[in-house]
Image (tube, helix red, strand yellow):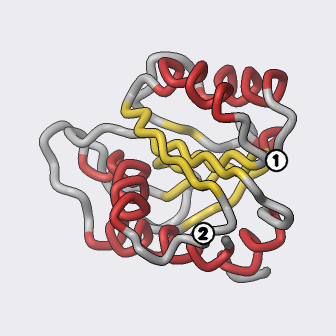
Amino acid sequence: MKSLKNELAARLKGARRVAVLGVGSELRGDDIAGILVINALEKSKKINKKIKLKTFEGSTAPENLTGEIIAFKPTHLIIVDSADIGEKPGTVLLLRADEVGRGVSFSTHKIPPKILIDYFAHSLKCEIVIIGIQPKSIGFGKPASKAVVSSSKSVTAAILSAL
């Protein structure tokens, strides 16, 4: 299997306008993974100046940002979230929009992620990349695990490298 960086680079080929939507809850342990990636991207100084990158913090209601994301007119949309993929904590999985809902469970959302992703797929003429990070625990009030914090840093580095 290709490395995360190489797979992302292939999926982001030709990117000119990239929207990154971080999803999750800061109150539920490892569900913070998408938010950690967004925060790190916003602080990064390594962003390719030829590519317009915009981050969106979707928290537990990413559907509230659909209008802003569509108005941005991305060539590529990356959605980062915790996802139960039945692997060890911190495992990262890249999915295409048509793969969501096939044995992958996302958590703490007000609407099912499949509906949101299908909406984006029909509303945007862009490549959609979903990055799921296996949580250890999404218990209320729990801290993020070392595995998920580390994977969030790896995902951030891979996105920056791929761009």
At which x and y percent is residue 73?
Answer: 72, 35
Query: In this view of the protein, which residue sits in the foreground, 38 or 82?
Result: 38
Label 2: state its secondary structure.
Answer: loop
Q: Give the CA separation, mark 1 to mark 2.
A: 20 Å
Label 1 CA crowd tier, 10 Å (few <14, some 14–19, many 20+): some
At which x and y percent is residue 4?
Answer: 66, 75
Q: Quadrant of residue 52?
A: bottom right
61 on left or right of 104: left
Label 1: state its secondary structure.
Answer: strand
Tell me which numbered mark, 1 or 2, is placed earlier along the sequence.
2
Q: Quadrant of the C terminus?
A: bottom right
Residue drawn at x 45%, y 35% is 107
1 on left or right of 44: right
The residue tagged 2 is 49
Q: Are marks 1 and 2 in contact (CB under 8 Å)?
A: no
24 on left or right of 140: right
At which x and y percent is residue 86?
Answer: 55, 56
Query: In this view of the protein, which residue sits in the foreground, 56 or 121?
Result: 56
Label 2 CA crowd tier, 10 Å (few <14, some 14–19, many 20+): few
The residue tagged 1 is 127
Residue drawn at x 53%, y 50% is 80
Mark 1: which amino acid? Answer: Glu
Q: Which mark is residue 115?
A: none
- Residue 139 visible to an observer of this rendering: no
Mark 2: which amino acid? Answer: Lys
Residue drawn at x 51%, y 24% is 65
Residue drawn at x 47%, y 40% is 56
At which x and y percent is residue 78?
Answer: 64, 50
Nearer the camera: disc 1 or disc 2: 2
Q: Quadrant of the N terminus?
A: bottom right
- Residue 130 visible to an observer of this rendering: yes
Q: Residue lying farthest front? A: 49
